[in-house]
Image (cartoon, coloured by chain):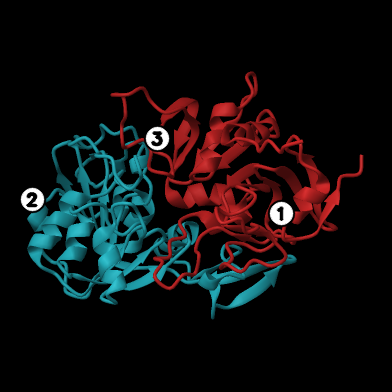
Amino acid sequence: MTVRKWTRAEMAALVAADIPDGAVVNLGIGLPTLVANHLPAGREVVLHSENGVIGMGPAPQVGEEDYDLINAGKQPVTLLPGGSFFHHADSFAMMRGGHLDVCVLGAFQVAANGDLANWHTGAADAIPAVGGAMDLAIGAKKTYVMMEHTTKTGETKIVERCSYPLTGIGCVARVYSDLAVIDVTAAGLVVREMAEGLSFDALQALTGAALMEKRT
Amino acid sequence: MIDKQVASLADAVADVADGATVMIGGFGTAGLPNELVGALLEQGAKGLTVVNNNAGNGDTGLAALLAAGRVRKIVCSFPRQTDSHHFDALYRAGRIELELVPQGNLAERIRAAGAGIGGFFTPTGYGTELAKGKETREIGGRMYVFESPLHADVAFIKAERGDRWGNLTYRMTARNFGPVMAMAAKTTVATVHEVVALGSLDPEAVVTPGIFVQRIVKIDRVATSAGGFKA
């Protein structure tokens, strides 16, 4: 049986399905932004962006963009009824103070102990830029990571110990990859769900840290 | 009579000294006080330390100040952008010093300076490269890093409406760093799109009380341009 990897939209739908009604959520730049398009109907989820807006709505119609109303990716957004604006220190207080329920981030690497590396490759010529990544990683009640399971060159992104500079220590609760959904627990990495056609052994072979099957 | 209105952008930035620390509001292009930064470029101050979330977009505003070699050091959270070519070139040539600060720590360090706080312990960055050499402490079973306040000689911010006392309101996410930077600088200069009579701003809606603002300058409204992202 051939493995059918989850598409980016399917990954976003998997994350979205796990976000409960009433949750306040911050979606990181890139892949996590797609989650907003897949929130199940009838579920009221409040989106926060660190540049000072809560209650974000979808992208505006073409021609209606106002660049005084943007998200952390600097893309134009809209405000839903009930939404509000605040300054940066308050915005990060929402995060650091533990008021956000869920934060979804991209990653270069996630370690078996929940360490996250997503801000810098450490390459000599790379210009370091961190933005709100370190605040987000440790601030929300639950930090989820959304990423491809392996790099473009086939290297595993789930590792025993991160080799890239860390963003946060022991902060990741769950990883959504294009092959599996994996919980980071005190006992180790526990596989919750796998893509169609994938065996546990095949997944383990593509993963740089020991996995456990979910006991049901 | 108190009147913080200044006639021109040039007058508003005339006394910025060489070597000054200048806070520049804005996140992406929203709230970027490019008119004041342009006036500072004309004014000629050099050897500046600039505090901004980013490190310039395109070829105008902060990017132009960088390109002109006026900035010795930049304190920011996210210098690398698709249109930050002037910063990138200076950084790679070793011609600018970079102090990289996680965004929330940057905002809180600025707020701390404005609030008279001598520093604070934050969990952000603990165990990472950006906390290297900094004091750490365990508080309630969690590890924290000590961060110091970030003061400035002058802050440039973009607000929406203001009155002659310097009371300010903002527009949507252009608020971002404005309110905390206004508190942290010895002299805060705000551009506004509208100067209104004293008493006409709803006191319940004033975001920055005039006590934090020394000068206001009226500018024409120009729609904020896109910037800082891959379209």
At label 2, counting other C-alpha atoms closer than 10 Å, the crowd grade (few under 14, some 14-19, many 20 or more) is some
Amino acid carrying label 2: it is Ser
At label 1, counting other C-alpha atoms closer than 10 Å, the crowd grade (few under 14, some 14-19, many 20 or more) is some
Instruction: Name the residue: 56% across, 42% down.
Output: A26
Amino acid carrying label 3: it is Glu
The chain coloured cyan is B
Colour of chain A in the rendered structure image: red
Relative horizontal placement of residue B173, taking residue A106 as reference (left or right) = left
Secondary structure at badge 2 equals: loop
Q: Identify residue for label 1.
A: A206
In which image quadrant can residue B121 be found?
A: bottom right
What is the tally of numbered marks visible in this picture? 3
Whole-angstrom CA distance, mark 1 to mark 3, is 57 Å
Percent x, y of residue B102:
48, 61
At label 3, counting other C-alpha atoms closer than 10 Å, the crowd grade (few under 14, some 14-19, many 20 or more) is few
Chain under label 3? B
Secondary structure at badge 1 equals: loop
Q: Nearer the viewer, residue B185 or B197?
A: B185
Instruction: Name the residue: 27% across, 43% down.
Output: B159
Q: Nearer the viewer, residue B13 or B211?
A: B13
Chain under label 2? B
Whole-angstrom CA distance, mark 2 to mark 3, is 29 Å
Amino acid carrying label 1: it is Leu
Q: Nearer the viewer, residue A63 or B93?
A: B93
Mark 2 vs mark 1, foreground winner is 1
Chain under label 1? A
